[in-house]
Structure formats: structure tokens, C-alpha cells
Image (tube, rainbow, N blue to C red):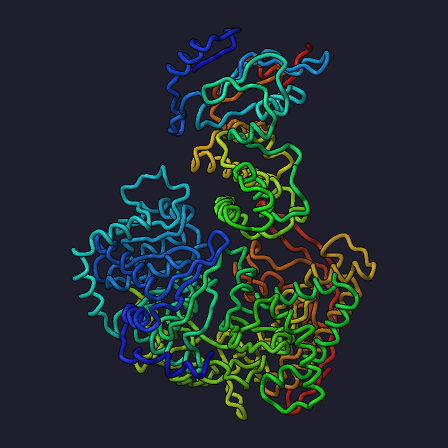
Amino acid sequence: MGGDNLAYMSEGAEGLRSIPALLQRNATRFGTRPAYREKEFGIWQSWSWAEAEAEIEAFALGLLNLGVERGDYVAVIGRNRPTLYWSMVAAQMCGAVPVPLYQDAAAEEMEYALQHCGARFVIAADQEQVDKVIDIQDALHQFEHMIYVDPRGMRKYDHRRLHEYSHIQDQGRAAYDEFIGELTARRESLGYDDTCVMLYTSGTTGKPKGVVLSNRNIIETAKNSAAFDKLGPGEEVLAYLPMAWVGDFIFSIGQAYWTGFCVNCPESAETMMTDLREIAPSYYFAPPRVFETQLTQIMIRMEDAGALKRRMFHHFMAHAREVGPKILDGKPVGLMDRLKYALGSGLVYGPLKNTLGFSNVRVGYTAGEAIGPEIFDFYRALGINLKQLYGQTEASVFITQQPDNEVRPDTVGVPSPGVEIRIAENGEVFYRSPGVFVEYYKNADSTADTKDPEGWVATGDAGFFEEDTGHLRIIDRAKDVGKMADGALFAPKYVENKLKFFPNILEAVVFGADRDRCTAFINIDLTAVGNWAERNNIAYASYQELAGHPKVLETIRGHVEEVNASVAEDEMLSGCQIHRFLVLHKELDADDGELTRTRKVRRKIIAEKFNDLVTALYDGSDSIYTETEVTYEDGRKGKIRATLAIMDAKTVPAAPPAMAAE
Amino acid sequence: MMDGTEQTHWTKDERQAAVKDSEGYVTADGRQIGGVLMELRNITLRFGGVVAIKDISFDIREGEIRAIIGPNGAGKSSMLNIISGFYTPSEGELWYKGSKRPPMKPYEVARMGVARTFQNIALFEGMSVLDNVMTGRLTHMKAGLAAQALWWGKARDEEIANREVVEKVIDFLEIQSIRKTPVGRLPYGLKKRVELARALAAEPSILLLDEPMAGMNVEEKEDMSRFILDVNDEFGTTICLIEHDMGVVMDLSDRVVVMDYGKKIGDGPPDEVRANQDVIDAYLGVAH
């Protein structure tokens, strides 16, 4: 696989200007090769490119029959299924714009997007999604027809505006002669600057925005990124991330259609891990938390394994951590170490990778948030080529990515092919590339705020290039990056992430903007610390009691000091070492407004709410009494009272004239 | 609605006449219920001197969800055991699909399209979910032992066809992710669902559920209720269930038989039964 496919892959694709055009190329060139697989009824059902084209064409004819016009918006809602991918391409064939929406969104959230784009047609996976749209249909003025894929439970619905997917296809096939001319004309008129897809960004602030991506954006990005990782038609991917997310569109449609590789859809969300093992993808993407969960599961299961197996696992994993990444990067490794690694592959790494479904991974990516270095190293030690990338919906994903053999946990790599990057004075990262989005739909102001007339897009993230390697490092959201009183750079998230990599620490909030030194709030992880307490016979009655236990505080102090040592190594950020900290008496919670629903800390709100604690961190007191209002899950409110100990942590003097240690 | 409590003995002609004029009824949510599928006539069951069921008659119609309720020891499970052929009634007749059913062994009853689940889960704990559900297809397997052991010829085709039915059931009940898991490792609520799957795999005409929600939490009850309604809706399966949770019974069923001390004290749509003074007494308790 891979390199030798390179020439083969782009053959006949140059000059094609739309996804439906690429589909035609694939159907002729890779006619009998699998294009889609989906596990259903316990068996992997597959469709070749030629079959996929026939399915898509039948559905597109059915859409014309239903009255889809050029420029219509067609919303697609559901989990990853071939039929829904076909729906998107069929909509494109008709000259319409597919708008995939998050399937777990509540009806009201969907209402906003459907109303904003004025979707005339909705394609929904099943009864659950259909019900949501029916709930809000009175508010949707342009909505006309809904098509559902899974007929279960739908028999008694009013079918005046509701159609079954397979019936639309049947009608399309029946009306072939009538509409094929029109369909061909529409397909052929698709240009490079026509809209390929519109994706709503989740929007941490304000309403979601509809990001318009053209065929040029998607195809150029697919082309560049496929060449970067030498993706060929032999790749296997598992499509399990939300269809509304730009990454899934690029992987499962952009790159898949450009290179002609096969997209596999799991049986259900719960069977994803089994399906992953069965498919053993060669190209794989997962957010850090997926890798974290998997690693935790492995560790728990190893604890339950027999003594011999456990010892073997720990022995060979220690060796793998040492030499595995070097072997992967092609660095020199001694013969004995190589032989031992080979033995380990046979006994431990191979079977483990097989269980995880990573036996064939040639290119693996993680992105979205920082990944813990030891998690990252674990997978690389096993010989899995896991890399990091940095991207955005507005960039059609790729801004930077790590080339093979230049992989490190703390950078996000070099600019992707065709991407220019510029760092503004305040540290904010700007980029310009063929993948840069056309506009935010019906939102010229936001478009102008984000993209300047020369095509430079603001990422909102602050970062810098490492001088020796040319790798980009992202330190924080630009708006959170500040200056300390002495002018040193203050990047709270950078330090918080380092803290959160310790399993005992669930959440951390670092303060220090415009102050002379940094301090922190810390939340312990009840599972990890509770487990530790159980093993060490430490009794506790509540979260609060455990969080205030002197031994726990000592452990956390150890973690903080380790982080300080690691932060001190970085001369730009060495001022962010934590001088004093406290362990909070309650878990930060979205119900109390301290976190967003996606579990990001709202530092402003936290600073205001716990103002007394912040003051205590800076006024030198040893402990502080506090009362906090909490909201219970049923909406009632209560108060927690606690006296919190304030801990000092050792800091390390940094090389340049930064902060003096206490 | 037909009500057989008054009449003590039926001739065949009378019975057929009764079926003929009972064209079924339409439920509150608009479902068409068909003619009589099973009819129990003057059933009495004795264990030595103990009378467990005393002269009970009721019918189950095609496509309906029929509930049997009553306090502990009312004889509900005994009634279900009579339908499934486990007990032979001491007196009375059981008519099924238009003819009188002679005393039968439970496996013979199963072959006639009656499947059931049990109050105390009766699955093979060491076998996988898939294998357990496959046992529900036993009544549809005709190939001999040797052919099955050799996985040859007709046995092979038969197993593939059976597996297809089983997979559809697995898909329907959303248990794909535990297909290969040994049943012993599953939580209670899922075991109940596997039992339902095994019963469904038999493609029954009548599905008997003995306390399908016993011991479940609210969420599991909601799931199970949805599956019961979906089974009835998608496959048109007639369902007869025993349940203690009154909320569930009243929401799910089309008609309810109420038993107390082996006697029938009420029969009709949920609202009617709820208003019945005998039923209220039986549940709240009066001196007997």
C-alpha cells in the first residue's frame, strides 16, 4: 500500500472539478473495488465504486423527481452510513448543497441551522431524527420534504411530506428517461468555485456559523493531504466521527473520492470498537480522548491478567517506550535492542495492536486538543504511526501536520502543503491556503472579521514556530494568552494541560494575568484518587474530604512541582510556574456554569465566583474558609462549606532572567 | 366485545358463530385488532386439593396486547403456563386458531407458534447472546443431527437462513454490541432483552411475556416498553403479558384480564378495569 499507489491514485483525477466528477472517475477506474462497507445483520455488506455510483445516481434522479433545484440546501442528519454519504453526493449531483448536521443536537439547535440555511429537504437516518424535525417543522418556512432511511416505526406517520429512501431511489430509477438528461447537465455544470458543502461550526460563542466550502477547497485539500501521507486507493478507513464535522467530510468524502479508497461504516456506535478491530484501518483519526480511554482500558485489563502476562507486558512495554519511537522514526538503534523489540512484537505489541484494531495503521492522526505525552508515546512505542495535526473547519481541516519521522507530542507539525502561516505580533496564528473557506453563509460581518481581503484567516490560537525544527507549537487560545506583571508571557491552558496529563488531576485553572506570579485551582479526579485511596486503606466519606486529605494534597504538590520543572525548560513560558495552589472542595461543573457543556473551563466566571479563594492564593494565608453555592442535578440549590489548605509549590529558576523562585 | 364468562359450555357451531361476528375492534391509537386467535374456556386448574385457577374464560385477539394482572398468588403465571402447554388444565378447553387444542407438550405448543419469556431469566449463561437467540430457532430446524454436526447440505442452508432471522431480531432489539458476549456477563436488564430476542427468533404467533419488567429501573422499563410496542407494531405479533407495574400495563395493553384468588374479577380496556370496584378492592385489599 502507499507509495506505489501514488501515481495510480491521481491518475485521471487531475482536472476534475467536483465530487460527482470524481465519483465517475472512480466508477470507471476502480469499478469493482470496494467503495463502501457497512456492517449490518452481523455481516459486512459492501458496495463497489460502480455500485455506489448506481445507488447515488438513482437517488439523485429521485431527488430531481421530488423537485430539488440548483442551489437548494439539503440537510443530512444521522450516524455514519453509506446511504447518508450517498445522499450528500446525490445532492451535489443535482446542483444542491448538502448540509450535514450533528445527529445528537437537540431539536432547537437543529431549528437554528435548518432555518438559517433554509433547507427545503431533509434526509434523516431514522425515526429519532424524523421526530426532531417534525417537532420544529412549523418554524421552518422553506422546509418541504423529508426522506428517512430506516423505516422502523415509521409506518403510521403522515406520509404527505415524508418519503422512504428506497422509494425515492425506486422513483428515480422509474423516471430515468425523464430526468437523466437534466441530471447529466447539472452534474457537468458543476465548477471549481461552486459550493461543495456547508458545515455549521459548533460555535463556543454566539450562534453557530455556516462555513461554505467550495469544490476547490475540498478537492485541493484532499489532493495535498493525500500526497503528504501518500494515501492510495488501498487505504481502509472507519467512518465513525460525526458527519457534520469537517474532518469526516474530508476523510470520508474528499480524500476517499480523490484517492478512491474504501469507507467503512460501523454497525452502531456501541459496536465501533469491534468493527474497528475487524476492519483494521490503514488510515485512522481519533480525538485524544479516544486514545486515552483505550489506554485506560488496556491498563485496567492488564491489572486483571495473570502474573506472567502482566510481567511480560510491563517488561516489554518498558523496552518499547525506550526504543519503539526511535525505530518508528528510523533513528539508529542497537542490534540487541532491535532483536528484543522484535521478540516483544511477537509476544506483546502485535497481539495488543490486533486487539485494538491498529495492526494495519500506517497513518494515524489525533487533533482537537492536547494529548498527554505518555499516551502519545505509548502508541508510538507500539509502532503505531500516530501523528498530530492542527486544523479548523475554515481551513478544510489542514493547517499544519507532522511529517513521518518528525513526530513529537508537543508540536502540531509543519505547515501542510499549500498552506502559508504567519504569526501576528500578539502571537496569533494566521494562515492562507487553497482550503480557506469561501464565507460564513449570510454573515458578511463575521466573514470579514475572520478572513482579510488577501485571504489570511485568523485562527484565534496563539503559537510560535520552533526555530530549529520549523514546527508550530500552539500554546493557547489567543484571547486567553496574556502578560504577567513583569511582561512575561502568560499561557494558562499550556500549564493546565500539563497538569491534566496526571490521571489524579481532572481539571485545573491557572491564574496569573497581570500578577507577579501564577497560582492554580485544582480538581482531583475522583476515580483515580478514589482508587488510590482504596488501595492505601484511606477512608473518606465525600469528595470534599478526599480532596482535602493531607496525603492527596502532598501528591498533588508533587505533580505541580513536576509541571513547574517541565515549564521551566521552556524559556518563553517559564514565568508560568505555579507558586501556590489549592485543591477545590467541589468538582467544577457545567450545571454551576463553571464549565461549558463541552467541558472547557470558563476562567472568568470561575475567577469571579471564587474571588475569595483567588485573593487567598495571593495574600499569603495558609488556609481559607469558604461557602459555595451548588446546583444539584434536579435543579435544587445548596451550599458547601469548607476550609481549604493553601499549598506552596517549589519552582525552578529558569535560565533567562525571568521570575526568581521563592 | 365478546365475553364468555356467562356461558358455561359452547358447541363448535356456537363458537364459530361467535368468531364470525367478532370482526375485531379498533384501538384508541388507531390499530385494527383482528378476530380471536386464542380462547380459553372455563379453565380450572387444580393441584391436589388446591384450586389455582377457577373457571376462567377469556380470549386473545389477533394483533392485540393482552395483559393479565392480579395480586401475588392470583394464578397469573399458572395461566401463562397453561397457554404455553406446561400445565394441562383440569377442566376447560383451549381453542387456538379455530380448533380445540388437545393436551400437548410444551415443545409441541412452541411449534404451533407460541413463544415465551420467563419470570426468572432462563437463558444459557455460558453461551453467547447469539447462540442463545439461535436456540429460539430450534423449532424451525429440520436437518438431522449428523447433517448439522457435519455442517453439510441442507443443514448448512438452514442454519444460514435461521441466522438471518436471528440477526434481524438482534438488529431490531439493538443488541449488536453484545452479540458475542456470554450471557452470564450481562446485566439483568440486557438479559431480559436477550430472552425477548430468543422468543422473537421463533417468529411466534403469540408471544407470552412473564413479568418482562420485573426488577428493572425506570429507564430499562421504558426501553422494554418501547420494544414490546415495536414488536407488536412491526411484526404484528400478538402479545400476552403478565406485569405488576400498573403504569406499564395500563399504557401498553389494549385489554386487561384481572385475576384474584384464581378467579377472574375483571376484563376489558385499561380504563374500564381501572374503574372496576372489584379490581380496586383486590389491589387495596378487603377482608375475605
Q: Residue at x 51, y 35 (%)?
A: B228
Q: Determine whether A529 is above or below B183 in the image.
A: below
Q: Determine whether A131 is above or below A113 in the image.
A: above
Residue B250, horizontal then vertical, whole percent: 52, 27
Residue A51, horizontal then vertical, whole percent: 33, 62
Tell me if B216 is positioned left or right of B30 in this view: right
Residue A488, horizontal then vertical, whole percent: 58, 84
Q: Determine whether B225 is above or below A12 in the image.
A: above
Q: Nearer the viewer, residue A374 or A625?
A: A374
Q: Residue at x 60, y 31 (%)?
A: B211
Q: Residue at x 59, y 65 (%)?
A: A607
Q: Determine whether B236 is above or below A586 in the image.
A: above
Residue A481 appears in the figure:
no
Residue B172, horizontal then vertical, whole percent: 48, 44
Image label count: 0
Q: Nearer the viewer, residue A581 or A371?
A: A371
Residue A310 appears in the figure:
yes
Which quadrant holds the C terminus of chain A? bottom right
Tell me if A376 is positioned left or right of A132 in this view: right
Q: Nearer the viewer, residue B168 or A270?
A: B168
